[in-house]
């Protein structure tokens, strides 16, 4: 298979061109497109499902569908929005089928992402505890609230774009967002805020993490 | 402005977006909303600390392996499969009228792919992609394959 996609194309270029190349069977173009979007797709799935393995499954499924659909891609359609939409729907399907996994919380790899390199031991402890609390609270949200929040907060989508991705009305999305944010505010009351208002963490909580 | 309106308006904002004069005035005079909004600001900030881990390096390779065409089966394998299929059809034909009619009707119903298994995904798909042209077999197979891939 001739590889025609240039490395480093990612800047301004054009997803439509890559999709045309993929439709012609150019695996290099597929690799370039995956390279461009895989972290975005994976991160959304990871935050939604709380598991690296499940998130990689979702990313794989999303890109395989994209590859198979390439011959019929409409050039005017924004590919990023399509990928977020498909990932969202696949995540909702997956979490509806496996709710128990979500309740188990995030897998260990997530905590590493919060480790504060320059912080002292106490600060690091607080940071890890807060990180875990945030992840648990987000994962405990109802599926649609969680997805709306992730798309809005991490993917930078507007309410309208979130509504488009989730197949809901803008009013419904606004309501989901508010309920999610309000609930997180209650759930995380003791973990967030400045040092004066935050409660002192019991040591046993940290012991359970290590 | 009532609290519900204030919260709906706030939900569409991303800190530190400006509140706007109306919302700001409401929050100044409503301690309940003020508390909620302060908590929301802190939640927003805490969420910002959550970065996802990097995707594993082998993801593309696994996808490419999945998309690689499978090698063709040898001729003897195809012949054996055809013979088995023929035997199956013959045996089915011997089973008799009423039972066969009833059974095949049920089987047809069960084998019909249900487009309702993933309606929202299908709807999303058709927003971004053209449907397969009518009577174009490979397009139709691609559509069916998408449906079949639904786990």
Image (cartoon, coloured by chain):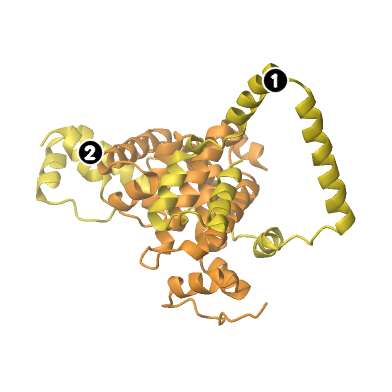
Chain colours: A orange, B yellow
Q: Nearer the viewer, residue B71 or A15?
A: B71
* Element assignment for label 2: helix
Q: Answer whether residue A127 is visible to the viewer in this image.
A: no
Q: Quadrant of residue A2?
A: bottom right
The spot of residue B39 in percent (x, y) is 32, 41
Q: Report if the CB atoms under discs 2 and 1 are less than 8 Å apart.
A: no
For the N terminus of chain A, which image quadrant? Answer: bottom right
Q: Is residue B120 left or right of residue B91?
A: left
Q: In this view, does A151 lie above or below A35?
A: above
The spot of residue A64 in percent (x, y) is 59, 57
Q: Which of marks 2 and 1 is nearer the N terminus?
A: 2
Q: Residues within 10 Å of mark 2 (few under 14, many from 20)?
A: many
Q: Answer whether residue A70 is visible to the viewer in this image.
A: yes
Question: What residue did someone put label 2 on?
Answer: B7
Q: Is residue A81 above or below residue A207?
A: below
Q: Which of A42 and B4 is in front in this view?
A: A42
Question: What residue did someone put label 1 on?
Answer: B97
**Which label number is shown at residue A93?**
none
For the C terminus of chain A, which image quadrant? Answer: top right
Q: How many marks?
A: 2
Q: Is residue B151 above or below residue A74?
A: above
Q: Residue at x 52, y 69 (%)?
A: A36
The spot of residue B131 in percent (x, y) is 44, 54
* Element assignment for label 1: helix
Q: Which of B44 and B151 is in front in this view?
A: B151
Q: Which residue lies furthest to the right in this view?
A: B76
Q: Which of B136 and B32 is in front in this view?
A: B136
The spot of residue A85 in percent (x, y) is 43, 51
Chain where mark 2 sits: B
Q: Distance between the residues labelled 2 and 1?
A: 67 Å
Q: Residue at x 53, y 33 (%)?
A: A96
Q: In which quarter of the image is residue B119?
A: top left
């Amino acid at each position: 298979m001739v590889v025609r996609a240039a490395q480093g194309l990612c800047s301004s270029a054009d997803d439509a061109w890559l999709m045309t190349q993929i439709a012609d069977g150019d695996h290099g173009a597929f690799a370039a497109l995956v390279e461009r979007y895989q972290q975005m797709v994976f991160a959304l799935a990871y935050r939604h499902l709380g598991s690296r393995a499940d998130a990689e499954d979702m990313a794989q499924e999303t890109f395989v569908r994209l590859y198979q659909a390439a011959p019929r891609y409409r050039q005017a359609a924004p590919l990023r929005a399509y990928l977020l939409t498909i990932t969202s729907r696949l995540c909702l399907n997956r979490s509806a089928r496996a709710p128990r996994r979500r309740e188990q919380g995030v897998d260990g790899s997530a905590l590493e992402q919060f480790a504060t390199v320059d912080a002292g031991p106490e600060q690091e402890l607080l940071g890890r505890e807060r990180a875990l609390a945030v992840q648990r609270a987000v994962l405990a949200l109802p599926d649609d609230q969680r997805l709306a929040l992730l798309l809005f907060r991490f993917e930078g989508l507007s309410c309208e774009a979130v509504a488009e991705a989730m197949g809901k009305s803008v009013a419904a999305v606004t309501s989901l967002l508010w309920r999610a944010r309000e609930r997180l505010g209650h759930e995380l009351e003791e973990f967030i805020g400045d040092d004066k208002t935050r409660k002192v963490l019991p040591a046993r909580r940290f012991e359970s993490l290590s | 402005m009532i609290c519900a309106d204030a919260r709906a308006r706030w939900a569409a904002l991303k800190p530190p977006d400006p509140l706007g004069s109306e919302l700001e005035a409401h929050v100044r005079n409503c301690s309940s909303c003020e508390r909620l909004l302060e908590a929301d600001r802190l939640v927003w900030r805490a969420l910002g600390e959550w970065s996802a881990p990097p995707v594993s390096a082998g993801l593309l390779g696994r996808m490419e392996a999945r998309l690689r065409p499978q090698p063709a089966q040898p001729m003897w394998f195809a012949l054996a499969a055809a013979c088995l299929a023929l035997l199956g059809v013959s045996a089915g034909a011997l089973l008799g009228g009423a039972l066969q009619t009833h059974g095949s009707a049920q089987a047809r119903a069960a084998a019909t792919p249900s487009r309702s298994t993933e309606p929202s995904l299908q709807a999303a798909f058709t927003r971004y992609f053209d449907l397969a042209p009518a009577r174009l077999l490979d397009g139709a197979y691609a559509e069916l394959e998408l449906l079949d891939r639904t786990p």
